[in-house]
């Protein structure tokens, strides 16, 4: 049976949730008639169309689309944003009534709220795909309370990208843990970065530039691990959602640490695989628990030894000292020590690389698609 599913997202930028959606939709072809509705135009639109995925843009007014999570508290959201959101819900409700899909599948936290309301008004079951921890260390307390309350009313089911994420919705009884995926073809073609090379040893970090992702902490640990040698640090990613000041602070911090000539700020890269192929070690050091940690699997897939914070999703992916190294979040000395150890121990790097490839092979779009289909069937069967 083929299900007609509308997928909702508020942005069309290539960030974690949007990349995850773009990876899994082609694997659902033949089982799902997919249609994506986005709140803005952007790179995701072209990527989906390139894969022959039906997509349309129903513009979500900027006043609603650009509301930052740290502004979700009593009195902080202006009436313009609230009015824009309400108007968008009615417009989306009308479009869903016109399309009459079997399911609505929301792909971001904002779309979970407005899409959940629109779906309920259109009398269509809604599945929330939650990739954010609904916890006070990740969201303002007002937002945590609001989302947890909405989770008991709006969605028929919740998909979370990790057990860590699902556990932050403690009162929701119908939840499924389905990790995000990475293309298996990259696993097969992964080139090992190990062995002798004419260039300096290179340690990299990949992700959106934002304080909780810990790029400043990465620089501190790198400086401590490799003082005065030729080891290079690569920082791949750019700021989003009005956090450009953090980017400037990272450049200034690298200069204060005396690292300006050894740190390369690569900016946003559409081809993350080309960047990863030039790393010798990948570091993932979020200071708050990461909901999943897609880049951890990407690093394993690319055949790179991975160091990650021992919290959240990465702690569910990595078995310490088997397929990666886990260090306590925010522990500069521990992260610096792990960086040095991997540089000095080729045998350990080789072992972690081989085991990491085996772990990454479990995170394929096909496997994720099959697990999502199980949720779809469960929701539709309960509706009958």
Image (cartoon, helix red, strand yellow):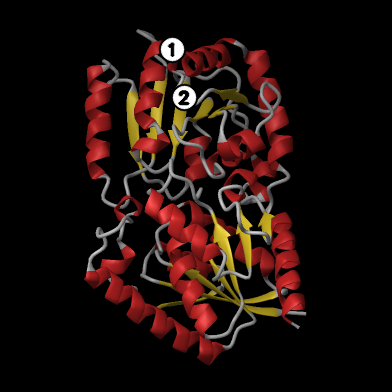
> Which residue is drawn at the image coordinates 50% and 65% (left, top)?
150
Foreground residue, 12 or 102? 102
Tag shown at residue 203 = 2
Q: In the rendering, which numbered label is found on residue 225?
A: 1
- The residue lying furthest to the top in this view is 228
Image vertical order of residue 14 relative to residue 276, above or below: below
Corner quadrant of residue 314 = top right
Along the horizontal axis of the image, is 186 left or right of 119? right
- Front residue of 58 and 268: 58
Q: Confirm whether residue 70 shows in the render.
A: yes
Q: Between residue 24 and residue 102, name the one nearer to us.
A: 102
**Label at residue 4:** none
**In what quadrant of the picture does the C terminus appear?**
bottom right
Kindly tell me whether residue 107 is visible in this rendering.
no
Circles 1 and 2 in contact, beta carbons < 8 Å:
yes
Residue 71 against residue 255 in the figure, above or below: below
Q: Where's the N terminus, which quadrant?
A: bottom right
Q: Residues within 10 Å of mark 1 (few under 14, many from 20)?
A: many
Residue beneath the point at 71% across and 66% down? 375
Q: Secondary structure at mark 1?
A: helix
Residue 30 location, x and y as percent?
A: 72, 74
Disc 2 secondary structure class: strand
Q: Position of residue 377 (x, y in %)?
A: 75, 72
Q: Quadrant of residue 297?
A: top right
Label 1 and label 2: CA atoms lie apart by 11 Å
């Amino acid at each position: 049976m083929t299900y007609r599913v509308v997928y909702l997202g508020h942005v069309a930028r290539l960030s974690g949730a949007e990349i995850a959606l773009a990876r899994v939709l082609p694997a659902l072809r033949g089982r799902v008639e997919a249609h994506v509705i986005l709140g803005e135009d952007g790179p995701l639109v072209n990527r989906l169309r390139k894969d022959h995925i039906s997509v349309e843009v129903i513009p979500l007014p900027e006043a609603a689309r650009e509301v930052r999570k740290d502004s979700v508290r009593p009195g902080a959201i202006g009436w313009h944003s609230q009015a824009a959101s309400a108007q968008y819900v009615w417009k989306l409700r009308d479009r869903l009534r016109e399309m009459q899909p079997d399911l609505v599948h929301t792909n971001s936290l904002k779309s979970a709220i407005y899409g959940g309301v629109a779906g309920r008004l259109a009398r269509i079951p809604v599945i929330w795909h939650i990739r954010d921890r609904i916890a006070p260390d990740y969201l303002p307390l007002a937002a945590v309370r609001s989302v947890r309350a909405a989770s008991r009313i709006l969605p028929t089911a919740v998909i979370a990208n990790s057990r860590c994420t699902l556990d932050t919705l403690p009162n929701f009884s119908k939840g499924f843990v389905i990790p995000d995926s990475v293309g298996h073809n990259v696993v097969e073609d992964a080139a090992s970065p190990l062995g002798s090379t004419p260039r300096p040893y290179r340690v990299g970090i990949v992700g959106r530039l934002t304080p909780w992702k810990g790029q400043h902490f990465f620089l501190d640990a790198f400086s401590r691990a490799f003082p005065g040698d030729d080891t290079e640090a690569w920082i791949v990613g750019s700021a989003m959602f009005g956090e450009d000041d953090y980017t400037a602070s990272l450049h200034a911090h690298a200069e204060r640490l005396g690292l300006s000539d050894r740190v390369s700020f690569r900016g946003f890269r559409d081809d993350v695989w080309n960047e990863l192929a030039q790393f010798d070690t990948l570091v993932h050091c979020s200071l708050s628990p990461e909901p999943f940690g897609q880049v951890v699997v990407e690093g394993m897939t690319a055949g790179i030894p991975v160091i990650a914070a021992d919290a959240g999703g990465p702690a569910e992916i990595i078995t310490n000292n088997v397929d990666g190294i886990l260090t306590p979040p925010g522990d500069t000395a521990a992260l610096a020590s792990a960086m040095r150890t991997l540089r000095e121990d080729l045998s350990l790097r080789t072992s972690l690389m081989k085991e990491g490839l085996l772990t990454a092979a479990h995170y394929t779009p096909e496997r994720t698609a099959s697990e999502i289909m199980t949720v779809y069937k469960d929701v539709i069967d309960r509706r009958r």
